Amino acid sequence: MMMMNNKSESRENTELEEAGGRYHDEGNGLKSNNEIELTRIRLMRSFVETQDPSSKVVDDLMIRRFLRARDLNVEKASALFLKYLKWRQTFVPNGSISASELPHEIAQNKMFIQGFDKTGRPIAVVLGARHFQTEGGIEEFKRFVVYGLDKLCSRMPPGQEKFVFIADLEGWGYSNSDIRAYLGALSILQILFVENKSLKSTLLEEIDESQLPEIYGGRLPLVPTQDS
């Protein structure tokens, strides 16, 4: 069993300014983390909008995530963000991926989305033993990954930037081995391996029983991604 969580693309707009925060020397005086971030968000937004006008529809939380990923370096964050926008426009030209584009992946009924952990992160479950290489190939699998991540993002409450991903490897065998697919999916996730004997207790540290899938001793039935 693997539990994974990762920063994601929340589409909710929330206030960036928060109470408190540590202070750092910058310029002629002390500035809070929030003030520094707000200043650099404005600088980055001004730059990326001149490079790609479509970035005007992106909220400040998205800009902030790219800045944090590059230690608030505006130049590096802008380059990464513009690369992401270009990829998104190419890979998801219609703005979203529909289940009708993923017939082979959806038919395997292997990904489920339901419930939230104790910090408000939405939860996804993937049953590895149900994954097989399909006629759709690696491109359909990649679209399926993006489809699932977009579903998770749409469920995020305001201000939340992470999700929990439970990868269940029970029953997984050689026939399920798809190295290219797994490398592509796992490269963006932080992984914690959990032994079966301590599975429920480990999950309950992060997830209330009312939000835990039934297959792990909780109360929620599994909901396929396409139905979530």
Image (cartoon, rainbow, N blue to C red):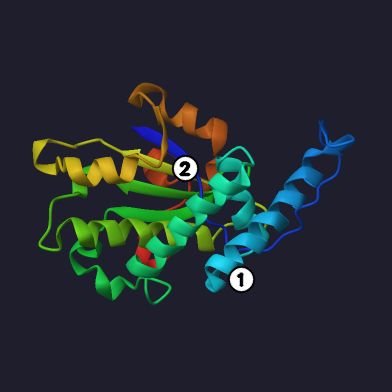
Residue nearest the observer in this picture, 77 or 221 = 77
Quarter placement of the N terminus: top left
At a point 49% along the width and 59% down the height, the residue shown is: 82
Dot 1 or dot 2: first in sequence order is: 1
Which type of secondary structure does the marked residue at label 1 adopt?
A: helix
At a point 20% along the width and 64% down the height, the residue shown is: 107
> In the figure, is residue 67 to the left or right of 103?
right
Residue nearest the observer in this picture, 171 or 163 = 163
Residue nearest the observer in this picture, 137 or 72 = 72
Q: Is residue 23 above or below residue 56?
A: above
Picture coordinates of residue 37, whole percent (x, y):
73, 46
Picture coordinates of residue 198, whole percent (x, y):
41, 23
> In the figure, is residue 23 to the left or right of 82?
right
Q: Give the number of the disc on residue 218.
A: 2
At a point 36% along the width and 33% down the height, the residue shown is: 2
Picture coordinates of residue 7, whole percent (x, y):
52, 45
- For badge 2, the amino acid type reads Gly
Quarter placement of the C terminus: bottom left
Which type of secondary structure does the marked residue at label 2 adopt?
A: loop
Q: Which of the 4 quarters of the picture holds residue 182? A: top left
Q: Give the number of the disc on residue 56.
A: 1
**Label 1 close to label 2 by CB (< 8 Å):** no
Residue at the right extreme of this rendering: 29
Picture coordinates of residue 184, whole percent (x, y):
28, 45
- For badge 1, the amino acid type reads Lys
